[in-house]
Image (spheres, helix red, strand yellow):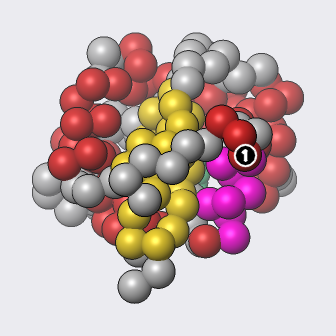
Amino acid sequence: MAHERTLAILKPDCVRKDLIGEVLRRIQEAGFSVCALKMVNMTKAEAEGFYAVHEGKPFFDELTDFMSSGPCVPVVLEKDNAIADFRELIGATNPEEADDGTIRSDFADSIGENIVHGSDSVENGLKEAGYFFPEHEIVANKA
Ligand code: DAT
Ligand code: MG
């Protein structure tokens, strides 16, 4: 199984609900290594850049408004099979469809405000980590 990197974002709803610690605890308990972490206030333009792949979709404006509505916490994670395992840990995009015990099922209010982002491919994991962190800020941690 390949050692992979994924980019998580603890979204503004996660920060507002004081769930940073709880969500990070679940992530670490699931075996992910935290390799970079910080708190940022994304501008609308930065949120639009991060989610450029969704430009033109009906929810794009709502999504980028939300992602720039307050501080969030980008986190670079590493683990064998990190991309798929992280998507499993967080659950489906719509919390009503997410499996019981997943982070989104337990904490998210809606499909738009769903607590956490996770990269969807190895290629995007590397690209998205680079959106927030220069390579020298991503440290080897138990890798
Ligand atoms: P995911 O975050 O599970 O990778 P995605 O890439 O399809 O989901 O969409 C990115 C984010 O956009 C998602 O986390 C929440 C928002 N979003 C997606 N579909 C939506 C919809 N139908 N209505 C409102 N927001 C939506
Ligand atoms: Mg996605």
Q: Position of residue 34 (x, y in %)?
A: 42, 43
Q: Residue at x 56, y 66 (%)?
A: 120
Q: Residue furthest bottom?
A: 1
Above or below 97: residue 110: above
Q: Residue at x 66, y 36 (%)?
A: 137
Q: Residue at x 54, y 61 (%)?
A: 5
Q: Is residue 64 magenta?
A: no
Q: Is residue 125 left or right of residue 107?
A: right
Q: Main secondary structure of the magenta part?
A: helix
Quarter containing the N terminus: bottom left
Tell me, yes or no, if residue 51 can be seen here: no
Assign a secondary structure to mark 1.
helix
Instruction: Name the residue beneath numbered marker 1.
Output: 135
Q: Residue at x 61, y 71 (%)?
A: 122
Q: Is residue 20 left or right of residue 93?
A: left
Quarter containing the C terminus: bottom left
10 Å crowding of disc 1: few (<14), some (14-19), many (20+): few
Q: Position of residue 9 (x, y in %)?
A: 52, 39
**Within 8 Å of ligand 2, the CB of disc 1?**
no
Q: Position of residue 119 (x, y in %)?
A: 56, 59
Q: Is residue 126 left or right of residue 115?
A: right
Tell me, yes or no, if residue 35 can be seen here: yes
Query: Please, what is the three-letter code of the amino acid marked with disc 1?
Result: Glu
Q: Nearer the viewer, residue 96 or 72?
A: 72
State the extent of the magenta-drawn residues as a range: 123-130
Above or below 97: residue 40: above
Count of number-bearing discs: 1
Above or below 114: residue 123: below
Q: Nearer the viewer, residue 84 or 13?
A: 84
Q: Is residue 125 magenta?
A: yes
Q: Quadrant of residue 39?
A: top right
